[in-house]
Image (cartoon, rainbow, N blue to C red):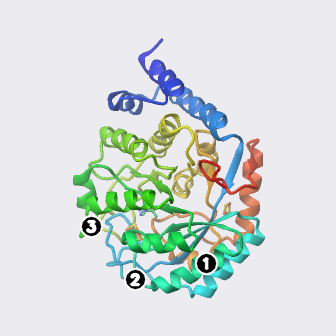
């Protein structure tokens, strides 16, 4: 049997690989189908056939950061900036509940556009609807994270983006890798379920770096891992870059499932931007979560991280029906539970 097949078997049975073994897997494309089937079996065995839906509310595109890859970066003057009022955000969450979502993800650029008191009001009000709350607001102080946790937030998404410190610092002017690690560690410590993840195909990123990313997810005991290809945006300094490949992204995701068998892994929107069946392929290669957009109205078009983002002209109602059909079409079901990692609730 080939060395690569041995590595896949080892990952499936022990959920542990060395950096070199991960690099070998990433470099060889010949056994990709075996890799995806193994990840699909581990997904089925550890987290089952249910797909958890999270309703994504993109509540503000105002951002003070300047991440080189992102369309919402502060210096992109082409973006028309918006912030939804607290009551509009609560209203969108209420609508998401009527579409039978059990979790809403509150995502925005990193800014100080809302006071801590306003965020607390939003979290408390949405929590009172009986929904689980995931926050994705970027880097904040431990104190601020603690206030939101106490107000009822359950989970927090903060991708490390890349564990290569040099690449990280080159792409995030004015930000520090250490502070990002501090944020993730504070969030875990405060009792949040933490989600992290990376971009695949960043400039100068090697297979070794992606292997380190996967080992990092395991080392911090992340509860959720969201990853996808870097897609160059014409209105950013990385406009001329090549971007990440769909196949590499799916492979990084599949290996992540093999090594972290019980975590939640979304089939990300960026995957579907590069492949029209990308989210279903992801769900059959290790993923068990989808995050349909529940932002109402014209705001979806204004939340352009990268070009080609899906569903920008669709309504929450349409997306809910669409995704249910697709999930059932591959023989899986939409979960009616909250979908916490350790079935805490
Ligand atoms: N391509 C793909 N993903 C991107 N993100 C930001 N810009 C891009 C891009 N050009 C991702 C980042 C961030 C998440 C909200 O969106 O990983 O964490
Ligand atoms: Fe802002 Fe997030 Fe985009 Fe960075 S990735 S520019 S923090 S919205
Ligand atoms: Fe939005 Fe299919 S999920 S149109």
Q: Where 131 falls versus 30 (above or below)?
A: below
- Count residues near mark 2 (Cα–Cα under 10 Å), then give few for <14, some for 14-19, many for 20+: few
Query: Residue 88, can we see it?
Result: yes
Distance, label 2 to label 3, CA atoms, is: 16 Å
**Mark on residue 320?**
none
Q: Return the disc, 2 or 3, that comes first in the chain's sequence.
A: 2
Is 53 placed left or right of 81 in the picture? right
Q: Is mark 1 within 8 Å of ligand 1?
A: no
Residue 5, image x, y percentages: 48, 20
Is 131 placed left or right of 286 in the picture? right
**Mark on residue 124?**
1
The quarter of the rendered structure image containing the C terminus is: bottom right
Q: Where 322 falls versus 88 (above or below)?
A: above
Query: Residue 81, can we see it?
Result: no
Q: Which residue is mark 2?
A: 112
Q: Are marks 3 and 1 in contact (CB under 8 Å)?
A: no
Distance, label 2 to label 1, CA atoms, is: 19 Å
Q: Are marks 2 and 3 in contact (CB under 8 Å)?
A: no
Q: Indicate the secondary structure of the residue bearing disc 2.
A: loop
Q: Is mark 2 within 8 Å of ligand 2?
A: no
Residue closest to the far top: 1
Residue 143, image x, y percentages: 39, 73
Q: Quadrant of ligand 1?
A: bottom left
Q: Which residue is mark 3?
A: 175
Residue 230, image x, y percentages: 41, 55
Which quadrant would residue 71 be assigned to in this image?
bottom left
Distance, label 3 to label 1, CA atoms, is: 30 Å
- Count residues near mark 3 (Cα–Cα under 10 Å), then give few for <14, some for 14-19, many for 20+: some
Q: Residue at x 31, y 49 (%)?
A: 163
Q: Return the disc, 2 or 1, that comes first in the chain's sequence.
A: 2
Q: Indicate the secondary structure of the residue bearing disc 3.
A: loop
Q: Return the disc, 3 or 1, that comes first in the chain's sequence.
A: 1
């Amino acid at each position: 049997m080939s060395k690569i097949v041995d590595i896949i078997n080892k990952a499936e049975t022990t959920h542990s690989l060395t950096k070199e073994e991960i690099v070998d897997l990433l470099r060889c494309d010949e056994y990709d189908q075996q890799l995806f089937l193994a990840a699909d079996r581990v997904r089925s065995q550890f987290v089952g056939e249910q797909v958890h839906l999270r309703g994504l509310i993109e509540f503000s595109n105002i951002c003070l950061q300047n991440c080189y890859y992102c369309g919402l970066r502060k210096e992109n003057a082409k973006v028309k900036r918006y912030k939804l009022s607290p009551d509009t955000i609560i209203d969108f969450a209420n609508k998401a509940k009527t579409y039978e979502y059990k979790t809403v993800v509150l995502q925005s650029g990193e800014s100080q556009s809302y006071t801590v008191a306003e965020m607390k009001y939003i979290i408390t009000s949405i929590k009172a609807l009986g929904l689980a709350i995931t926050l994705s607001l970027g880097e904040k102080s431990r104190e601020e994270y603690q206030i939101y946790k106490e107000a009822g937030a359950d989970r927090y998404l903060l991708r490390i983006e890349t564990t290569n410190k040099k690449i990280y610092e080159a792409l995030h002017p004015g930000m520090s890798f250490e502070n990002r690690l501090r944020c993730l560690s504070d969030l875990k410590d405060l009792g949040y379920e933490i989600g992290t993840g990376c971009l695949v195909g960043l400039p100068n990123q090697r297979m070794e770096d992606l292997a380190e990313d996967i080992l990092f997810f395991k080392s911090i005991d992340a509860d959720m891992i969201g990853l996808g290809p870097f897609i160059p945006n014409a209105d950013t300094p990385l406009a001329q870059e090549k971007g990440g490949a769909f196949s590499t992204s799916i492979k990084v995701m599949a290996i992540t499932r093999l090594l972290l068998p019980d975590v939640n892994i979304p089939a990300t929107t960026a995957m579907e931007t590069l492949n029209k069946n990308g989210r279903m392929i992801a769900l059959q290669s290790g993923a068990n979560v989808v995050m349909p957009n529940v932002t109402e109205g014209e705001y979806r078009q204004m939340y352009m991280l990268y070009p080609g983002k899906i569903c920008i002209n669709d309504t929450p109602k349409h997306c809910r029906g669409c995704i249910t059909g697709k999930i059932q079409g591959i023989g899986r079901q939409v979960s009616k539970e909250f979908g916490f990692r350790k079935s805490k609730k």
